[in-house]
Amino acid sequence: MSGQQALFKRVAIIGLGLIGGSLACALRRNGLAEVVVGADKRAEELALGAELGVIDQAAKSIEEAVTGSDLVVLAVPVRATRAVLAEIKPWLSESAVLTDVGSTKSSFVADVEAVFGSLSPQVIPGHPIAGSEKSGIRAANPDLFARHKVILTPADDANPEALANLKRLWEGCDATVLTMSVAYHDEVLAATSHLPHLIAFSLVDTLAGEDENMDIFRYAAGGFRDFTRIAASDPVMWHDIFLSNRDAVLRVIDHFTHDLDQLRDAIANQDSAMLLRVFSRAKAAREHFSKMLSGQAYVTKNSENQVTFRLQPGGAIAGDIRVPGDKSMSHRSIMLGALANGITEVKGFLEGEDSLATLQAFRDMGVTIEGPDDGFVRIHGVGVNGLQAPRGPLYLGNSGTAMRLFAGLLAAQVFDSELTGDASLSKRPMGRVADPLRAMGAVIDTAEGGRPPMKIRGGQHLTGIHYEMPVASAQVKSCLLLAGLYAEGSTSVTEPAPTRDHTERMLAGFGYHVHRDGATASVSGGGELVATDIDVPADISSAAFFLVAASIAPGSDLTLRHVGMNPTRVGVINILRQMGANIEVLDEREIGGEPVADLRVRSAELSGIDIPEDQVPLAIDEFPVLFIAATCAKGRTVLRGAEELRVKESDRIQVMADGLANLGVETTVTPDGIIIDGGQTISGGRVDSEGDHRIAMAFAVASLRAAGDIEVTNCANVATSFPGFVELAQSTGIRISAEGAE
Ligand code: S3P
């Protein structure tokens, strides 16, 4: 920042404690103000501030500090705010920006209004979420705010320029700035900071009052120490905070007391279901705390977590591996398990971000789910009508399957719900499910162009319809069948081409009859699901990367175990075999209503083909890596009838063509497919996967035949479908490393 123009000419910091002092030295060090003036009633602190170089000038009075300043920062104890504001008032210029650093914001606004008559657009309350057990100017630290959050709570009519400058000021101290309303700030802080402090103070006080207190403290293990660390905080400061944020704190105390009473009753009544439900929900929430704090209901905002794959060229593939569980079946196992009567146990569950989002959403709707623990999940089904209203929007991350299937399920619930997702999911078309659901009687709002969020009104009566799907989509089919469980009469769906039928198979496994007549599947509403156990096979869509890898890398020989071989999913094997791949299907068996096999794949000379259009829906997720196979094949490969690829997690036709072009491979993109002339050299280079998991993994596979190093950026979303991809790929011989992984 030094050398650039300072954001403010003269900044007055009133109160040189830890926060005021740290801000002063951060401003100075980062050149964010021309002059930093400090004021403090405690003469020694003020003198120390000047001596330690925390401030440029020590002002002898508030008048001297405030006069001529274009930013005034109040950093005094919350309860002193009003009196200090009254002292500031006569000297504050109309164009100066006024902010503070206090922990409660309604009280600051009330103090400003009391002193100034109204909240001027120049006043922007602030709260840096940073601190230390140390206090006073001696502890001032210019890095105190680095990688911490600062909350600003501007009013609607706040001066945008003042807000922008203040934001830049905090960002210049390496903080992340969030803005929210005053009321929301106080509610959030009451829950996340004030209540835990209150409980810590109270617990230590209670235990200290017990007769055997010495022993309690002597034997107190890590749990007690961890839990009560904050009870050593400054009593006066916390006294001020609780009195200043009284209403919000009282609300959250009441809520907590009520929940604590319920737990007390559950223990008294030996209600293990209740205890398990609360504990497993809390454990999951705690594990994903940071994600939740970033405003997400559950999964990582992966776009913020940059992961880059680095690949060295060449290598052969060998080994005996099992890829993670099938994503489609993992989603459905949770959904149907939750709606069943009884306990469903799932083995082989995919612990990827997508299926975890589904799992969390059901927890949010009151379902007790134990695990996942190494692919094992136990779902305590609540019955078809047992879901409870979630407390907020259900966040489904990157998962189109979750959003579309949830839409069907939630359209028929008694409660309202809202479905949201990440940037990629927020661009994907939802009209394809919202429209037929509306025809059944659902009330659903979407954003412009039928995009998420989807707002679903509860309490609607659904009636079965017959629907001819314009696109071959298992998600649309499944959505309508799930809505059909609740609809009056029969709901039937005809597909223009076969799509994956896991929903139909799994419903049957849960004892719910699905009628099949050619291309039409139908259910009658009003039935029940009976819990069952599910063994999720390895995902053929994940196996596909290794099928291609071993095919294109000379000298390869790889076995993939327990791969799901549902006939509606084996397009990738059919296509690769037609190209000349050497794939043996071994030990075919049926497990829980789904065919499974081991696959042995050895390298082979591949040839380009015209991909039969009827294979497109059967290999819909495998095209990114099939394009790599085509690039390594002899002759031309033509794909048609695959416009659906343009509305997947990314526009997979264009993003693959762009990535290949970066590696020197020319292709011809058509509206519904691509033409790839094989045999071109794959050079080294840099490819942006655009956050699409399957594109990232496809280019990792391309490295096996590349002439130079490949770097694939934006790979965090590989965790949505294939956790552990990098390690597994390394173990087979792909020369991959990941940078920036969590
Ligand atoms: C899926 C269906 C397919 C597929 C997706 C999973 C499912 O989507 O691409 O990865 O589990 O039903 P469409 O139904 O949109 O083709």
Image: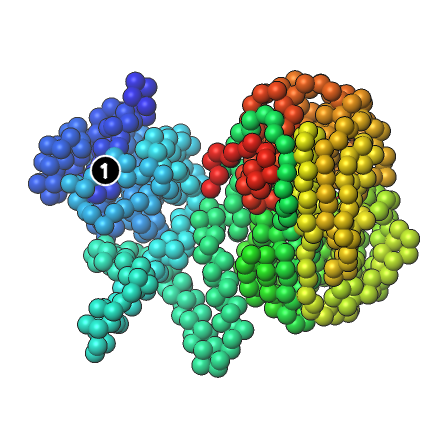
Q: Secondary structure at mark 1?
A: loop
| Left or right: where 480 falls relative to 160 | right
For residue 130, side relative to residue 332 (left or right): left
Residue 189, given in percent of the width and then of the height, sits at 37, 53
The residue nearer to you, when weighing 222 against 683, is 683
Q: Residue at x 48, y 57 (%)?
A: 285
User: Residue 672's quadrant in the figure?
Assistant: top right
- Residue sitting nearer the eye, 192 or 441: 192
From the Cβ of disc 1, is ligand 1 less than 8 Å away? no
Q: Nearer the viewer, residue 288 or 365?
A: 288
Q: Is residue 187 left or right of residue 694?
A: left
Residue reaching furthest to the bottom: 269
Task: Say which quadrant the N terminus sits in.
Answer: top left
Q: Residue at x 74, y 59 (%)?
A: 591
* Residue 87 seen by the camera: no
Q: Looking at the image, which residue is at 19% across and 42% down? A: 139
Percent position of residue 563, x then y:
71, 49
Q: Hey, which residue is sitting farthest right in the picture?
A: 518
Q: Relative to residue 239, is residue 532 depicted above or below? A: below
Disc 1 crowd rating (10 Å Cα; few below 14, some 14-19, many 20+) is: some
How are the colours assigned in the image? rainbow
Q: Is residue 176 above or below residue 437?
A: above
**Figure check: 724 above or below 239:** above
* Residue 260 horizontal side relative to residue 685, left or right: left
Q: In the depicted view, which residue is nearer to us: 5 or 366?
A: 366
Q: In this figure, which residue is indicated by the disc labeled 1?
A: 141
The amino acid type found where label 1 is placed reads Asn
Location of residue 35 in the rendering, given as x and y in whole percent from the top left corner: 22, 26
